[in-house]
Amino acid sequence: MTSILMVCLGNICRSPLAHGILESKLHSDQFYVDSAGTANYHVGDSPDHRSIDVAKSNGIDISNQRGRQFKVSDFDTFDYIYTMDDSNYQNVIALARNTDDIGKVRCILELEDSIKIKHVPDPYYGGISGFQDVFQLLEKACNTLSKKLQNSDI
Ligand code: 4NP
């Protein structure tokens, strides 16, 4: 089993989308996907309704996900940890115990050469179009990531 963790700040907007999109592209008997936030603001909460709606309109149900905070033991549980932006990256790296932990962490958009921006913008304070933009960015990145994972090319 290969395990992948998606990380953002609140675990209600971006990482639940990344979690749902990647999960939809992989076989659950070979890959385990989860998400977490670096902050504890939304522990136990459902994803933001705008993320739920955008996912649903693209055929993905993320309504059963619940927010949780990133924890040090996630470095042991997961093979790959993808952060949405540099702030999340720095927050996760600050908890790393050794170079093995650090080596598991990357910003997700660094995977996809065709995307010019390197960080998934935080859509929380904006309108629905920001969530649609985030979905498109993550769809592209997760498409590349799913192929790399399936081909062991990562
Ligand atoms: P996320 O967005 O990190 O993509 O889940 C946010 C969600 C909540 C907050 C900030 C960003 N907040 O400040 O509560």
Image (spheres, helix red, strand yellow):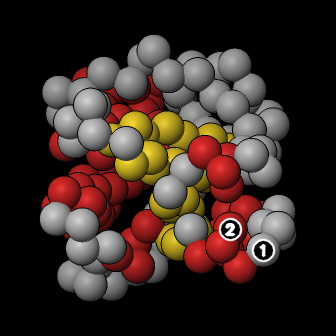
Callout 2: 10 Å neighbours few (<14), some, many (20+)?
Answer: many
Left or right: 28 as drawn, with respect to 6: left
Identified at 30% across, 21% down, the residue is 61
- Locate residue 146: give its quadrant: bottom left
Foreground residue among 71 and 120: 71
Label tally: 2
> At which x and y percent is residue 20?
35, 35
Q: Secondary structure at mark 1?
A: loop
Q: Secondary structure at mark 2?
A: helix
Residue at the spot of label 2: 101
Q: Is residue 137 visible?
A: yes
Foreground residue among 116 and 81: 81
Tell me if label 2 and label 1 are in contact, CB under 8 Å.
Answer: yes
Residue kind at label 1, given as amino acid type: Asn
Identified at 74% across, 26% down, the residue is 43
Identified at 53% across, 28% down, the residue is 48
Residue at the spot of label 1: 98
Left or right: 100 as drawn, with respect to 39: left
> At which x and y percent is residue 52?
39, 26
- Locate residue 58: give its quadrant: top left
Q: From the image, which quarter does the N terminus lie in?
A: top left
Q: From the image, which quarter does the C terminus lie in?
A: bottom left
Identified at 56% across, 68% down, the residue is 104
